[in-house]
Image (tube, rainbow, N blue to C red):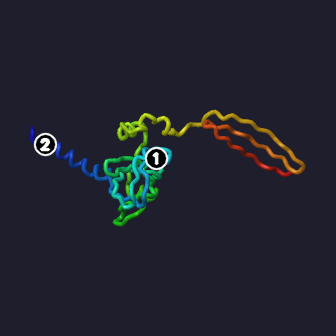
Amino acid sequence: MTRILVTTLALAAAALFPVAARAANPAVAIQTVNLRAGPSTAYPVIVTVPAGAPITTFGCNASYSWCDVAWGASRGWMAAPSIQIIYAGRPVVVTPAVAASASLAVIAFNQAYWQTHYVGRPWYGRWNGYYRRPYAAAPVHRAGGVACGPEACRYGAVRHGPNGATVRYGRIERP
């Protein structure tokens, strides 16, 4: 009975090793770059990583524009064009095509990630100030009308979006 249990555990552990090996990829920062607390320049800087520094890449966001990396004891997000991985036996910069072909994992950035890696940081309690959730279509306030001059009429509208942005659009028509 013990032998079966040990064999089962050994096979289960062996099955997990390839997954663990694929989960973290060695890489290099190709320029001096800020390691940030989230996938945007709006997030605080954790540390500045020097050019040529070895890093570990765990995966990237869905658009492959930012990657979840570690440098020493620091974990955070780095702009993908600043990362070089080994793919097909040669060093390449991370682009969406390379990331997908190299099977870099897609990593979700959410509050659980924040709570796992940033407890104790001075900005830890300001999650809501940094995180910008993709917003659904919100009510749009419209004002519109037609304005005619001596040779043309123009119609258009002013839209006030959910975050205060104003968009004006219209078309000039000749009579």
Write down the quadrant of residue 12 in the picture.
Answer: top left
Q: Which mark is residue 39?
A: 1
User: What is the residue that sits farthest to the bottom in this orientation?
Assistant: 90
Write down the quadrant of residue 146 in the picture.
Answer: top right
Query: Counting residues from the N terminus, which is met first, the one under dot 2 or under dot 1?
Result: 2
Q: Position of residue 17 (x, y in %)?
A: 24, 50
Q: Secondary structure at mark 1?
A: loop
Residue pictured at 45% horizontal, 36% vertical: 127
- Name the side, left or right, on which 7 lies relative to 66: left
Residue 105 seen in the current view: no
In 3D space, how far apart are the residues under numbered discs 2 and 1 (Cα atoms)? 42 Å
- Name the side, left or right, on which 86 lies relative to 156: left
Q: Quadrant of the N terminus?
A: top left
- Name the side, left or right, on which 57 lies relative to 174: left
Residue corresponding to mark 2: 6
Residue 122 seen in the current view: yes
Q: Position of residue 60 (x, y in %)?
A: 42, 50
Say if 158 sits above or below 97 in the image. above
Say if 141 sits above or below 149 in the image. above
